[in-house]
Image: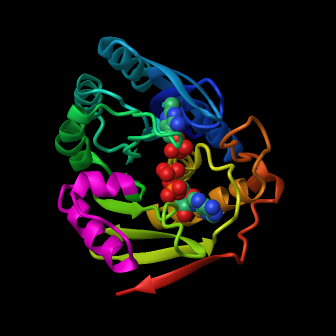
Amino acid sequence: MTSVALTIAGSDSGGGAGIQADLKTFQELGVFGTSALTAITAQNTLGVHAVQPVDPKTVAAQIRAVLDDLPVTAIKTGMLFSDEIIRIVAEELKSFPSIPLVIDPVMIAKGGASLLQNEAVLALCKQLLPIATLITPNIPEAEVLTGQSIHSEEDMEVAAKALLSMGPSAILLKGGHREDVPFAEDLFMTADGEHFLMRSKRIATPNTHGTGCTFAAAITAELAKGHSLEDAVVTAKHFIHAAIEDGIELGNGHGPTNHAAYRKSGQLKTKEVELIERN
Ligand SMILES: Nc1ncnc2c1ncn2[C@@H]1O[C@H](COP(=O)(O)OP(=O)(O)O)[C@@H](O)[C@H]1O
Ligand SMILES: Cc1ncc(COP(=O)(O)O)c(N)n1
């Protein structure tokens, strides 16, 4: 049977991040992608030029239209932009508690533009984190959500525990922004206390536009196919590593990753991704 995933996110006209990255990733992993658009951004590899949020009622109507008819088996959220959109998304999703929900708490684009209004952070914490199967903050997002600064593996562990206390079942704290270390290391931790690190070589490239969206979409696709959360995050790490390694030279700024790289490699699990168990 065809697996179906839903992404609730913003549009990136440049095609590297947002809903476009999510749908390409779903397709590459053999999952039928559906979407609910939260905002239109005029964006390219150099930055965000304009943001037009979608009317919250229209966001809700898109979610309902998809979930009332199609057999969605995993949902992801990306750019949500406002308090009103977050509240209405949470309200809609509360009726579907059995569908795994991945929340990527998107806040700031690589070029520095805000994709989440400051006053919406509280709604994100109160309305969405408690119903999430997994949250996937990067380091700056985890710093905003916890109010703690993160500079080391130990800081990542403390922040992950603080974020789990806000209610999600699990967290994947992405370490891509720790440019002081030669590896790209992400910490996975569940509310049940399981945790491991996923470490890969840091690739020297400016082409990292949409890495967070693509990573969370790959996890969602794997969950939609019925894989466990642990297997989904590991496969997604291989997917994003291949996509960054084979990045595409497009535009004059932060170019996109290559969503097709993992499939083209024959879904090869590279030795460059190392799992480090912790207890
Ligand atoms: N230069 C890089 N080389 C290899 N992996 C990277 C690189 N930058 C980010 N990653 C990985 O890409 C994923 C997304 O990471 P991150 O950049 O932290 O998130 P975001 O795109 O949300 O800011 C993580 O698995 C991270 O470890
Ligand atoms: C519409 C939209 N959503 C999300 C991102 C974040 O992208 P990144 O993964 O590069 O942080 C973005 N730039 N645009």
Report the predominant secondary structure element of the magenta stretch.
Answer: helix
Does the segment drawn in magenta span residue 164?
A: yes
Residue 266 quadrant: bottom right
In the depicted view, which residue is nearer to us: 274 or 70?
A: 274
The C terminus is located in which quarter? Answer: bottom left
Residue range (magenta): 140-168
Residue 119 vs 201, above or below: the answer is above
Q: Position of residue 147 (x, y in %)?
A: 21, 57
User: Eyeballing the image, is 275 above or below 205?
Assistant: below
Q: Nearer the viewer, residue 203 or 180?
A: 180
Residue 74 drawn above or below residue 200: above
Question: In the picture, residue 116 is in which quadrant?
Answer: top left
Looking at the image, residue 272 sits to the left or right of residue 43; the answer is right
Q: Please name the residue shown 20% across and 39% down the image.
A: 127
Residue at the (28%, 76%) spot, across then down: 193
Residue 64 rendering spot, x and y as whole percentages: 36, 20
Choose between 43 and 276: the one closer to the eye: 43
Residue occupying image coordinates x 36% and y 31%: 80
Any part of residue 226 in sight: no
